[in-house]
Amino acid sequence: MAFEVVGKLHELYDEQQVSEKFKKREFVLEIDDNSYTQYIKFQATQDRCTTLNPFKKGDNVKVQFNLKGRPYTSKTTGEPVYFTNLEAWRIEAAGGGAQKQEEDYMMPDNFPAHDDSDIPF
């Protein structure tokens, strides 16, 4: 699943070498949703870790990411535990911050009206 969000770079962590074959770099976006400020943590993995190098805290960025989840069975309880990751695959400068984000998702005035009667559910 691919998603996109615009926000201010709130935290930028160092790259972590998790195993011999896996590395990641985490970062936090500050997103103003007009009610409460949200702080969302993302991760970039492998060669995408370097895509964060040009940015610093306070920069407005646009992040394209995949929503990933997987189960894990706890060795102590035998119960399933679920992990969710927001895996960034593209990070670029965004000029307008939160205002730009709202404009990106507004429907244009000339967008044709949709007739819900043809939806199969």
Image (cartoon, rainbow, N blue to C red):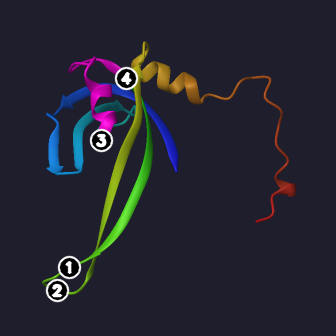
Q: Which residue is mark 3?
A: 46
* Left or right position of 8 against 92: left
- Of the two numbered discs 4 and 3 on the same chain, state the one appearing first in sequence: 3
Query: Whole-percent x and y of residue 58?
Result: 24, 18
Q: Amino acid at mark 3?
A: Gln
Label 1: element kind:
loop
**Residue 47 counted in the magenta span:** yes
Query: Whole-percent x and y of residue 39?
Result: 27, 38
Q: Which residue is mark 4?
A: 61
Which quadrant of the figure has residue 79? bottom left
Name the residue located 15 percent from the left edge and 42 percent from the top edge: 16
Mark-to-mark CA distance, 2 and 4: 41 Å
Mark-to-mark CA distance, 3 and 2: 32 Å
Name the residue located 38 percent from the left edge and 61 percent from the top edge: 69
Mark-to-mark CA distance, 1 and 4: 36 Å
Q: How many marks?
A: 4
- Of the two numbered discs 1 and 4 on the same chain, state the one appearing first in sequence: 4
Please tell me whether mark 3 or mark 2 is closer to you in this view: 3
Q: Amino acid at mark 1?
A: Ser
Cβ–Cβ below 8 Å for labels 4 and 3?
Answer: no
Q: Magenta span covers which residues?
A: 41-60
Looking at the picture, does residue 79 appear above or below residue 113? below
Please tell me whether mark 4 or mark 3 is closer to you in this view: 3
